Image (cartoon, rainbow, N blue to C red):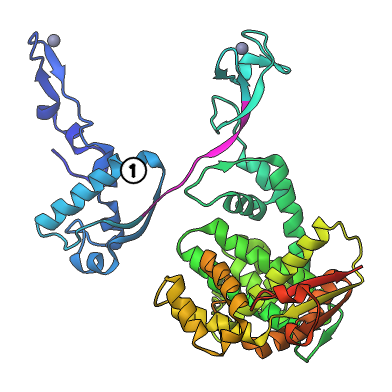
Amino acid sequence: MEFTGSGNPLATSSSFINTTCPECGAPAHRETDTMDTFVDSSWYFFKYCSPFSEQVPFDKEPVSYWMPVDQYIGGIEHAILHLLYARFFTKALRDIGLSKIDEPFSRLLCQGMVNKEAPYCELCNRFLPPDDYEGSSCSVCGNEYKLKSAKMSKSLGNVIDPRILMDNYGADTSRFFILFGSNPERELEWSNAGIESVYKSLEKSFHLLIEMPGSVKDTIDARDNYINFITHKSIRDATHNFEELKLKDAITHIMILIDELSTYSKTHVNKDIYNEARMTATVLLSPVIPHLCEEVWELTGHDDFIISARWPICDETVVNEMNEFKWNLLSDLSDDIREIIKVARITSPKRIRIYSAAGWKFRLAALFKQEFAKTKDRGQIMKTLMSTDLKRYGKQVNQILGKYLNDPALAPYVDMGLDGEFSFLNEAALILESGFNCAIEFYKEDDSHEKKAAGALPGRPAIIIDL
Ligand SMILES: [Zn+2]
Ligand SMILES: [Zn+2]
């Protein structure tokens, strides 16, 4: 047998090839294709770590440095056979002392299928390949077919040719559509309208990212702080999602930043905060739409490649519990106002009045949180509350306690205090004003005789809309 490094060595051995048939004794040939394809695929990842070793299959040192594989990505068809053989080889190599690796792969991701609508005949109870329908009817039974989602396959003819996508929309749009359509392990429903709308929205984002708004300033108000918060929150959330390969979720967080940036760009923006926000969005998006982001990077004055740019880091003094609580409070408040406007069918509100809860309610909420951590017993908590100066408000305390026990999330997880909440809302007024296009006024329940104001809770101000 000759081992030349090319071709099958068995095929060079006539003593192996030539034999006699065990049944009839006539001359016969032996099969030379005896090496299963799984033999190589079961240990190639060891060889990849040590490609230059010629005397041995692989060297121990680079293998123990690189292995195990951090992330295995494969279709579900690999889930049993390849993983089984690869693990067997890995353990056998360990047992004969060639490596110390026990498991070949640390993490597994099985990507989902891509589906697209295809003609389906309910009478024939099957999908119709291109030859089996004409116009809108099944050519087997004549019945009108329906469109139903099916795994993309050549036989059904519901495959999208990637080349056509590249020609019409480019690689970035196609990739964005696929990654944003669903997380990798889920199925993806293909839609031509979907890719068209991705194309348009990326075009809009591109212009947003390359152009600086006309009206810039150096001072900082609540709106600038808000964008800065969203910028750093999206760094935190998108990075976390990218690391977990939740790519759709990562993109969702980045697109929230881009949406907010678009609203922000129509106001008087802080130059540095705006710049940081748009450059952050660009770097975060660059793994998804690299070509477009390189273009933005160059057009915004960078002379290196975005691929070598530093990945942004979330500033934890910006995204902390208190700030998250504050901005959530504001966004819940906006949602509540919007809901009232919708339900009451208000076309253009003249004025919106917002009432922060009485000071004692803040003390109640803080004390409730503290006691609730110790006991869920209503009587016990009430007893503690009544042993303080809250006793004066006994009946109301009992009512609020009932609400908090019914839904503990109602009690704010951060204690801003009445003054903290009131001054935050006053600062944030300009965000609400531009959102609702009317005057926004802030009051304290303590100073008011409005009946509705009595419904205010800490973190949940009461709202009155004047027509
Ligand atoms: Zn024979
Ligand atoms: Zn039919």
Q: Which residue is drawn at 70% across and 83% down?
A: 225
**Left or right: residue 442 compared with residue 242:** right
Q: Which residue is drawn at 82% across and 71% down?
A: 464
Q: Where is residue 265 in the image (x, y as percent from the top left)?
A: 80, 74
Q: Quadrant of the N terminus?
A: top left
Please tell me which residue is depicted at 29% across the width and 60% down the height of the picture: 51
Tally of marks: 1
| Image-quadrant location for residue 283 | bottom right
Q: Mark 1 points at which residue?
A: 79
Helix, strand or loop at mark 1: loop
Residue 290 in the image: x percent, y percent?
A: 61, 63
Mark 1: few, some, or many residues within 10 Å (few <14, many ≥20)? few
* Magenta-colored stretch includes residue 110: yes
Left or right, residue 426 beside residue 465: left
Which quadrant of the frame does ligand 2 lie within? top right
Q: Which quadrant of the rendered structure holds the C terminus?
A: bottom right
In the rendered view, tell whether residue 327 sits above or below residue 424.
Answer: above
> What predominant SS class does the magenta segment belong to?
strand
Q: Nearer the viewer, residue 320 or 50?
A: 320
- Where are the magenta residues, as a range? 108-118
Question: Could you tell me which residue is drawn at 71 percent across and 86 percent down?
Answer: 422
Q: Hey, what amino acid is under mark 1?
A: Ala
Q: Is residue 167 above or below residue 203?
A: above
Q: Is residue 239 above or below residue 162?
A: below
Q: Does the magenta stretch include residue 195?
A: no
Residue 320 seen: no
* Residue 35, percent from left and from top: 22, 36
Image coordinates for residue 441, horizontal then vertical, percent: 83, 81
Rendered image quadrant of residue 424: bottom right
309 and 441: which is toward the camera: 441
Left or right: residue 98 versus residue 452 is left
Of residues 67 and 336, the one nearer the viewer is: 336
